[in-house]
Amino acid sequence: MSGTLRLSTLRLLSSRSSVCSPARLTNRCQARTRRLHSSAGHALPRLPFSTVTPEDVDFFKTVLPGRVVTDPDLLESSNVDWLKSVKGSSEVLLRPQTTEEVSQILRFCNSRNLAVNTQGGNTGLVGGSVPVYDEIILSTALMNNVLSFDNISGILTCQSGCVLENLSSYLEEREHVMPLDLGAKGSCHIGGNVATNAGGLRLLRYGSLHGTVLGIEVVLASGQVLDCLATLRKDNTGYDLKQLFIGSEGTLGVITAVSILCPRKPRSVNVVFLGCETFPQLLRTFQLARGMLGEILSAFEFLDAECMRLLNTHLRLLNPISESPFYVLIETSGSDPEHDGAKLHAFLEQAMTSSLVADGTVATEESKIKALWSLRERVTEALTHDGFTYKYDVSLPVEKIYQLVLDMRAHLGDRAKSVVGYGHVGDGNLHLNITSPARDPALLAAIEPFVYQWTSGCQGSVSAEHGLGLKKRNYIYYSKARPAVALMRDIKTMMDPRGILNPYKTLPDDLQ
Amino acid sequence: MSGTLRLSTLRLLSSRSSVCSPARLTNRCQARTRRLHSSAGHALPRLPFSTVTPEDVDFFKTVLPGRVVTDPDLLESSNVDWLKSVKGSSEVLLRPQTTEEVSQILRFCNSRNLAVNTQGGNTGLVGGSVPVYDEIILSTALMNNVLSFDNISGILTCQSGCVLENLSSYLEEREHVMPLDLGAKGSCHIGGNVATNAGGLRLLRYGSLHGTVLGIEVVLASGQVLDCLATLRKDNTGYDLKQLFIGSEGTLGVITAVSILCPRKPRSVNVVFLGCETFPQLLRTFQLARGMLGEILSAFEFLDAECMRLLNTHLRLLNPISESPFYVLIETSGSDPEHDGAKLHAFLEQAMTSSLVADGTVATEESKIKALWSLRERVTEALTHDGFTYKYDVSLPVEKIYQLVLDMRAHLGDRAKSVVGYGHVGDGNLHLNITSPARDPALLAAIEPFVYQWTSGCQGSVSAEHGLGLKKRNYIYYSKARPAVALMRDIKTMMDPRGILNPYKTLPDDLQ
């Protein structure tokens, strides 16, 4: 296994000094830190955690017989994130099956001062799901049982390692759907979805996980199990502790099980794919859809012509309608095919006669629906073929989301290969992506902090749904006031005093 | 002003000893504590806060000129809760208009160790919104400005003292509605709604405030302003701090402003009122409604025949249909009157032909809709005329909610005057109410802990939507595990080290 770190993005993070004082490091740690630090550019130095000893591995093997991975080849894929932008050097991966096992692991790691990186499907885009140095990887992959499903209330309870798509299939057979859906559904774990407060494609309709997650079981850094696994729609007995863990990116506890409210499976689903000449027309189309499709509107997504070009070029996906500067994907989900069809027809007629949309196609059968969705869902994949990609996931007042793309294009001129915008119009969430033939520090310096300042100037969020992880942690102040970030640090310190849970993530370096 | 406390419910709370050590009390506090304690039965003794001096009042008058109330007659109504079950003896009521004023007040109170009770519309049912002893009352009544409304996104930002009904009217003119509605809407403040995580009548459709509240501005005990007043649907930059304050009953901070996502006003609203012969039939009617009304179902409420008797007897409200053991109120809200009518018609036909419902009436015009809703909303009022009322608000697996009423009736026999059940079927939320001609300690001893043990045995919540406040604080362990409650206490201690914010509330006596 290579000992080299390729923490490319860290080179470009804030130059704030780390809070890791050399005086606090053991000799062994110092040596390790120097070695890693020298290859990690401006990365935060390794914090003074213990390193895993053979005796530690022996202990893990007694707790998890046959489920302790130390083979470097097998560890390789868990040390690297999906974008291949962050690579850790963990030498141990643990595969617990039960909450009790997770509890034993954490109790031990806390007492030994061993850092732990919890990993679900490892589909995160901000380097939150992989170790940075030699943190122990705690995989939820074998915690994949559905614990219960109540068909009357629609409440599902399951272990945290269930793959989202498997849960969707499980529910589909029971006439329900998951309240969230996202491109990574084939790999991502529900625990990771909850830990990162995943947004995705259905948020417009079913709201955020803060509303749909009803209960969480979590193991704290101390190994204590916190059972907040309620299966009730309403419970006002004290502070709603589970909310703390939703979106905390594994830094406050290890989620071992969740209960979640699942909607009935819609009897009727329609997807339309439309072309708009201008972004203001696209916004008026959104307003029209909100009014005329009302309660059956379940997604309103967009991509620009540049995205379509990349889909054509790199994935050979064909544009099903005539060329337009903007494309819109609208999904409706309802309980009556006839009513839904009538609403959609009336909406489309109005949109056409008002000249809001130039062209469009409608899908009601599943294969065509999937084909249209893939135009939206596979933009991320197309980008990976276009070159080195700088990814931004911002939330803005909806009327401003495309102006950022235009301003960035003008700002960068021909320094970038592609500057593309797509995302969730209904949520005011833009995915801005910029590619270049190879990693380009000068280009990055032109993008950042420009993109963050622009977003902050509109009171936007510099991470709408991807989280902060490792790569965005130091940009938190663009979206959060200092007292708020200080309170986050206080919460972290209270709940994980030794800081063993997913270190280097979420909180900025000045508070690590 | 009477100095007598009528903390009736406290007499019957747990006999756990208070954490207030007499050794920590000043002489003046000791005297005050003895006086109050002697009249408060087993109430928690007054904690060793300072008492308000004339100099303190002078300070408040400089911060809030003309807005410091010390006239006992004017203070009377703010010292007593709506149910007249808890009475404090506060001698000062403050009426700030701005966040900065709240900040100055709390900074001063924290430095002086003065306890503060934040009060909105004072409509709470668990004694959470009034002082217990001489806490300063901080009223949000003058913080009643709408700060902004974005018609495209539906995001409203307002000060915390806005009355819910006023916000509803404001939005109605702008083609939107508040995502929550409740019987107390004419008095309750949005800040209080958020602080208590109010549920109400629209939760089935629009979800809980944890999902719809997008931002909060809050003043911490120290006086520091925490600005989390985002107006974005998505924001994953660090821990979602606002969630901590939703449902914390004013014990962690004073909410000064909120932003909230408001749905479009439905173009079509229908209400049906049905009679069912048995509760299992009522549940099957609910299942049928979920399937056939789908996305337009916005409320599914019930009351039993005993409730109807009280409405007839005490409020002269007439039953619009033939007598039944159970009554159901179903509301639909949608964007197309024709489609909604068709769905409702099909549902009713199916419910009738399946003999699930015995009789029913439909309302589409506003006055009749209001009349039907009043049958559900005014049960609380009817109960106050029936005698002394013991109120329980529990959350249970939906198929079990009425069994508790039946078991309680059998358990109490003729010791109770009325034992009635009503509530939000769609949320698994039962309001169980028991009346007697006068306060009756023997009856109460028969009800509690029976009701809590019964609920706990079904993994239910002993407070679904009312919160814990003063009256239910010691029952938290019936619904929450000890480690969870201990973590709540740690959070409270971290955020309010002197415990000045709404003391004696939410957390149990052993952790106060």
Image (spheres, coloured by chain):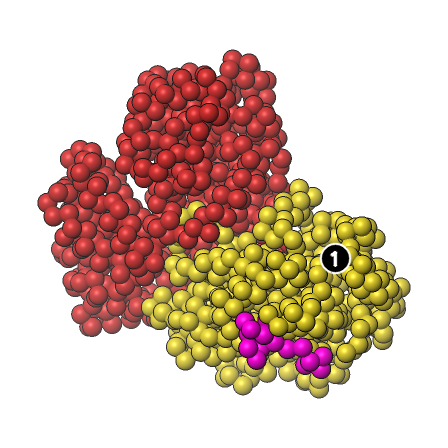
Chain colours: A red, B yellow
Q: Give residue B34's position: percent from left, percent from top.
A: 84, 62
Q: Which residue is mark 1?
A: B47
Name the residue rendered at 78%, 60% in the picture: B29
Residue farthest along the top direction in this orientation: A54
Q: On the image, which quarter does residue B139 sit in?
A: bottom right
- State left or right for residue A389 relative to residue B131: left
Q: Is residue B64 covered in magenta?
A: yes
Q: Give residue B220's position: percent from left, percent from top.
A: 55, 57
Q: Nearer the viewer, residue A316 or B437?
A: B437
Q: On the image, which quarter does residue B108 sit in?
A: bottom right
Q: Nearer the viewer, residue B472 or B1?
A: B1
Decide: is B394 above or below A373.
below
Q: Is residue A327 visible?
A: no
Q: Is residue A141 covered in magenta?
A: no
Q: Give residue A62's position: percent from left, percent from top.
A: 59, 18
Q: Residues within 10 Å of mark 1 (few under 14, many from 20)?
A: many
Question: What is the span of residues highlighted in magenta in the rendered image?
Answer: B60-74
Q: Nearer the viewer, residue B427 or B213?
A: B213
Q: Which chain is mark 1 on?
A: B
Q: Quadrant of the N terminus of chain B?
A: bottom right
Residue farthest along the left direction in this orientation: A414
Q: Of helix, strand and loop, which one carries label 1?
A: loop
- State left or right for residue A392 relative to residue A249: left
Name the residue rendered at 38%, 41% in the picture: A473
Name the residue rendered at 22%, 58% in the picture: A403
- State left or right for residue A362 relative to residue B249: left
Q: On the image, which quarter does residue A271 sit in?
A: bottom left
Q: Give residue A446's position: percent from left, percent from top.
A: 19, 44
**Amino acid type of the residue tagged 1 in the rendering:** Leu
Decide: is B180 above or below B65.
above
Q: Nearer the viewer, residue A93 or B35?
A: B35
Name the residue rendered at 37%, 49% in the picture: A477
